[in-house]
Amino acid sequence: MNAIEITNLSKTYKGKKFSTVEALKNLNLTVGQGEIFGFLGPNGAGKSTTIKALVGLIAPTAGSATVMGVDISSHEARRHVGYLPENPAFYDYLTAEEYLAFVGKVFHLPESLLREQSERVLKLLELWEARKRPIRGYSKGMVQRVGLAQVLIHDPDVYILDEPMSGLDPVGRALVKDIMLELKARGKCVFFSTHITADVETVCDRVGIILKGELKSVEHVDKIMTEGVLGYNLRIRTRNQPELVERYVAKEDLEMVMQKLFTAGDEISLIEPSRKSLEDFFLDIVKGKIC
Ligand SMILES: Nc1ncnc2c1ncn2[C@@H]1O[C@H](COP(=O)(O)OP(=O)(O)OP(=O)(O)O)[C@@H](O)[C@H]1O
Ligand SMILES: [Mg+2]
C-alpha cells in the first residue's frame, strides 16, 4: 500500500469580486512507505495548499487523496498523520511538556506511553531543559522544535511537514535530517515541502517540483545527481613529474583518458565528478528550460 496517493487534486481559492486563484491543478502523485519525498517549489507554488488538503484543513475543489489507504475526507486518515504546519503557533501559555501531553491525549496515548514518548522527543529535540517554561518565552527555532516534537509524539506512519527546516540553525537542520532518516529506516513516510534544494539533495529519495500549481517533474534524486554529471576533475601524478597535475575530463572521454593514463603508468590520486546540482535542475524548470 502506498502511504500517500493523490489523484487529480485541484484547489481554486475564491477571492473578492469573483476573482479566483488556481492554487493547485490536477495533481497526481504517490509516495511510498519508507520513502522521504521532497516537495520543492518557489513561493506561492501550491505546496502548503497541497499539504493542507492532505491533512484535511482545506477541502479540495476536485480530486481525491488517501493516506495509508484512508480517504483524506475521513477523520480516520488523521490518525496516521503527523503534521507540521508552515508557521506553527501553539497555546503559548502552556509549557512544551503540557502541550505534548495535550497532543498525546488527542491521540489517546496511554498515560505511561505518553510520559515515555514525551521524555524521548523532548530530549531528542533538545527541549528537555526548557520543558517547564511556557512556550511564549521560546525562541523561533525552539517553537519550530515544539512543532516537530508534537509530530513525533504519537509515532504515526506518515509525516507531512510544511518547511520543517524553517527557522532552524545548522545544528537543528542536521538534527531534522537525522530524524527523517531514522523514520525512513523504520518504514515511515516523510513528505515535506521546502524551497531549499540542499535539504532535498541530502535526504530525499525523490523530489517533486511544483510550479504555479502544476507538478512539473517527479524524479529520483540519485538519478538527477548521476545524470547531472558533466565531467570529472582528475588529479594525476605522472611518471616523469613528482607534482600533482589537475585535469578536467568531459564525461564521455573519461574511459579513454583513463586507459591512456594506465598505459603510460601514471597514477590517479583523485576523480571528482563535476555535476549540475539539484539547484541547477530546479532553476532550469523554474525558468522553463525543462518541460
Ligand atoms: N486562503 C487563501 N485564499 C486565497 N488564495 C490563497 C489562499 N491560500 C493560498 N492562496 C494562494 O494560492 C497560491 C499557492 O499558495 P501556497 O500557500 O500553497 O504556496 P506555497 O507553495 O506554500 O508558497 P510558500 O513557499 O510561500 O509557502 C498562492 O497564489 C496563494 O496566494
Ligand atoms: Mg507554503
Image (cartoon, helix red, strand yellow):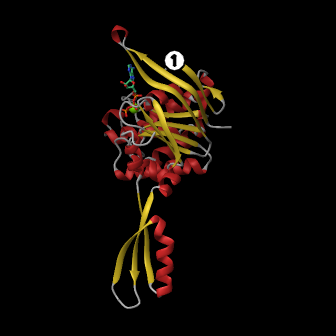
The residue shown at (46%, 87%) is 264
Q: Secondary structure at mark 1?
A: loop
Of the pair 124 and 25, the residue shown nearer to us:
25
Compared with residue 134, is residue 243 higher up or lower down, i.e. above or below?
A: below
Of the pair 171 and 115, the residue shown nearer to us:
171
* Residue 132 seen from this side: no
In this view, which residue lies farthest toward the top?
A: 17
Residue 283: % across, % down: 37, 44
Residue 204: % across, % down: 50, 48
Can you tell which quarter of the image residue 249 is in?
A: bottom left
Residue labelled with disc 1: 61
The disc labelled 1 sits on which kind of residue? Thr
In this view, which residue lies farthest toward the bottom?
A: 240
| Residue 25 as seen in the image, left or right of residue 66 | left
Compared with residue 120, is residue 20 higher up or lower down, i.e. above or below?
A: above
| Residue 127 as seen in the image, left or right of residue 62 | left
